[in-house]
Image: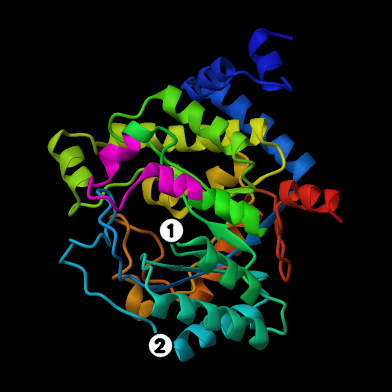
């Protein structure tokens, strides 16, 4: 057995091991990496892909992140709020179509009305589905009391991407206005753990100024923070953002650059799967924005979660975090059938009517019961 094959089977990888694997570009070695990660996925989480029906219900945001298409100062965006009745109708559709879970996502707000709205919305979805639909929230930084209210209402997973575990790189992605503090974001993840959520986070891959060492440290951050689910994807440009304009001006969005970011994204999925064997990992739509088969490639590299869009079609074009977002024109029915085909094409099955909790979280839970 050669040194590379031994590295892929290594039980306790070092930071240098992670860096070596993340740097891979050789086609044959990449294939070996992805096959090894898929084998770990099959063994530790199963060849089952779990859906998180994604309802993007509002693009109003108080934050001004320098990479995001719905940032506060992007005045090209027409702001929207989905009516409660429409959100519940979309949730009903997901329930009737055997989705085990929903993800409720929006721009970030921190006012009392928003907190109360989310709390009641979670309760209404739980009532409508007889407690059967799992609920993931992805609505940003909040006070611990707010997180607790939502948890007690019935939400059980929360996704808050750290974007980068490097505080200095984080500063470059966010305006220094007192409202975008890396330490606050980390503190929110700690609050979510204390309350009892399954905690999700993730990074953007291939950012300007980001190093392979940064990405390896992101994986170590997931371990050190005891993360249960990971939603990470390659950076994709939005033309009307400070970071996007910089990348476009510098020629950093060429086909070659996009291909490099795609490979880095797949490498991050695979190496994370090898290192954190029993967590949930999403194959994000950003992969498909860079390659028509991006999400299939993500599943083959070790991902086990997909987020089919359930957002009302009339609002999808106004919820663009980046350019060329896939599936914007698709109906929920088209999205479901499309993803079923993608899952089948890699030899996996869909875990219909199942929450698809992270085995990593389930093992922790068993220790306290």
Q: Residue furthest right?
A: 369
Residue at figure coordinates x 64%, y 41% from the top left: 226
Disc 1 designates what residue?
A: 141
Q: Quadrant of residue 211?
A: top left
Task: Tell me the quadrant of the picture where the C terminus can be found.
Answer: bottom right
The magenta stretch is 169-187
Q: Quadrant of residue 34?
A: top right
Q: Earlier in the sequence, mark 1 or mark 2?
A: 2
Residue at figure coordinates x 23%, y 63% from the top left: 72
Alpha-carbon neighbours of circle 1 within 10 Å: few (<14), some, or many (≥20)? some
212 displayed left or right of 102: left
Task: Tell me the quadrant of the picture where the N terminus can be found.
Answer: top right
Q: What colour-coding does the image apply?
A: rainbow
Residue at figure coordinates x 77%, y 48% from the top left: 364
Disc 2 designates what residue?
A: 83
How far across and down, in percent of the image, does residue 327 sit? 41, 65
- Indicate whether 161 appears above or below 61: above
Q: Residue furthest left?
A: 249
* Gap in angstroms between the C-alphas marked 1 and 2: 23 Å
Residue at figure coordinates x 56%, y 30% from the top left: 220
- Indicate whether 254 appears above or below 88: above
- Indicate whether 331 appears above or below 65: below
How far across and down, in percent of the image, does residue 165 sit? 44, 35
134 displayed left or right of 109: right
* SS for dot 2: loop
Q: Nearer the viewer, residue 181 or 255?
A: 181
* SS for dot 1: loop
């Amino acid at each position: 057995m050669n040194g590379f094959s031994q590295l892929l089977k290594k039980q306790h990888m070092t930071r240098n091991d992670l860096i070596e694997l993340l740097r891979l570009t050789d086609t044959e070695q990449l294939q070996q990496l992805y096959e090894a990660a898929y084998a770990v996925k099959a063994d530790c989480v199963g060849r089952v892909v779990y859906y998180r029906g994604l309802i993007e219900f509002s693009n109003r945001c108080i934050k001004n992140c320098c990479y995001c298409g719905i940032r506060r100062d992007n005045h090209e965006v027409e702001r929207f709020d989905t009516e409660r009745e429409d959100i519940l109708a979309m949730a009903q559709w997901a329930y009737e179509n055997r989705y085990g879970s929903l993800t409720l996502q929006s721009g970030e707000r921190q006012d009392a009305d928003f907190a109360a709205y989310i709390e009641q919305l979670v309760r209404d979805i739980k009532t409508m589905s007889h407690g059967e639909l799992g609920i993931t929230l992805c609505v940003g930084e909040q006070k611990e009391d707010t997180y607790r209210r939502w948890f007690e209402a019935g939400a059980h997973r929360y996704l808050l991407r750290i974007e980068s575990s490097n505080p200095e790189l984080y500063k470059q992605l966010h305006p220094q206005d007192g409202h975008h503090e890396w330490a606050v974001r980390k503190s929110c993840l700690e609050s979510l753990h204390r309350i009892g959520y399954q905690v999700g986070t993730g990074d953007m891959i291939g950012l300007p100024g980001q190093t392979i060492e940064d990405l390896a440290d992101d994986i170590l951050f997931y371990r050190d923070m005891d993360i249960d689910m990971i939603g990470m994807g390659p950076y994709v440009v939005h033309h009307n953002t400070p970071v996007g304009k910089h990348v476009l001006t510098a020629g950093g969005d060429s086909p070659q650059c996009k291909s490099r970011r795609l490979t880095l994204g797949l490498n991050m999925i695979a190496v994370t799967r090898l290192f954190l064997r029993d967590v949930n990992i999403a194959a994000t739509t950003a992969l498909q924005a860079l390659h028509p088969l991006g999400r299939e490639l993500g599943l083959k590299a070790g991902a086990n979660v997909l987020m089919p869009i359930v957002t009302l079609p009339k609002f999808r074009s106004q919820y663009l975090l980046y350019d060329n977002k896939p599936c914007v024109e698709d109906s929920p029915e088209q999205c479901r059938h499309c993803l079923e085909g993608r899952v089948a094409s890699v030899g996996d099955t869909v875990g219909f009517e199942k929450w698809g909790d992270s085995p990593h979280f389930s093992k922790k839970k068993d220790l306290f019961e």
